[in-house]
Amino acid sequence: MSMQTIDTAAGRFRVALDGPADAPVLVFSNSLGTTLEMWDAQAQRFAQTHRVLRYDTRGHGGSVVSPGPYSFDQLGGDVVALLDALGIAKASFCGISMGGLTGLWLGVHAGERLSHLVVCNSAAKIGTAEGWQTRAALVRDQGKAAMAELAASSPGRWFTEPFIAAQPALVARAQGWIAGIAPEGYAACCEALAQADLRGAISAIRVPTLLIAGASDPVTTVADAQAMQRAIAGAHLAELPASHLSNLEAPAAFADALAAFLATGA
């Protein structure tokens, strides 16, 4: 893995590049409260066929933590700036949860930069503005203590109970990601989620699109994915035996669905 820091027109980002330099590019975008390491298993598999680009979303990991609030115009623009800085004209994009909303924004506003769009465990609107604003205020007020509390409660939002029991090391690793996020970056992304509502816009997406949903996801449900499928012409839907972070809970099924989609023209 080639970990590096890239300066873009939008700021500095921590990225990882794997796979042949001349292969088609596949971008992975993380969920709220995680880092690019959440994609380790997928990077290992897809680096055989793609140039895999992972990055820490603004406010997360080793990327820029600018003052909030953020917006998806900003988070989507960050991806375009990263592609520009790396000289990438077009890429496939796979984002989960918050990263999935970033993908929807790209599909609407920068579809010419995408060859395939994969939106995982996400929705055109996630949660309520009030819920996100309350969480942002709590994190700003309590700082690292709030992040520790979020880390403690995150397994129940992210994974099914059997998986939590069977994979304690992976669950603990995921908790470590959220505990290490800068409070300002996390709060600012919550504020982006509070304002984001692309339900009226995604019908404009013309990029070949795959929607991945977790059958047990309490955050972004199968019904959310079905609503996006109805709105986006020709979109495919894959339902996996997982909760919210399906790429971690069902990595083989996730990779199979993604590989089959990327191998098609649509």
Image (spheres, rainbow, N blue to C red):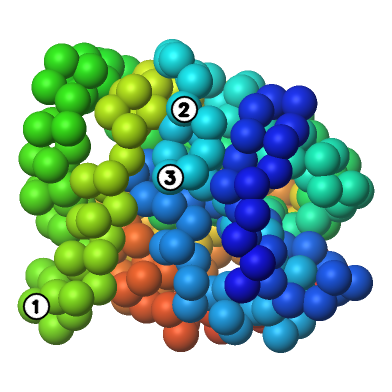
The residue at which mark 1 appears reads as 165
What is the x, y in percent for residue 177? 30, 53
- Amino acid tagged 3: Gly
The part of the image, by quadrant, that contains residue 158 is bottom left
Q: Is residue 47 left or right of residue 115?
A: left
Q: Secondary structure at mark 2?
A: loop
Q: Is residue 56 left or right of residue 93?
A: left
In the rendered image, the vertical position of residue 4 relative to residue 164, given as above or below:
above
Q: Which mark is residue 65?
A: 2
Q: Is residue 161 left or right of residue 235?
A: left
Distance of mark 3 from mark 2, alpha carbons? 9 Å
Of residues 60 and 26, which is closer to you in this image? 60
What is the x, y in percent for residue 20? 81, 77
The residue at which mark 3 appears reads as 61
In the rendered image, the vertical position of residue 1 relative to residue 88, given as above or below:
below
Q: Which mark is residue 118?
A: none
* Residue at (37% x, 50% y) in the render: 34
- Amino acid tagged 2: Val
* Residue at (14% x, 83% y) in the render: 166
What is the x, y in percent for residue 102? 58, 38
Q: Is residue 188 left or right of residue 148?
A: right
Of residues 231 and 177, which is closer to you in this image? 177
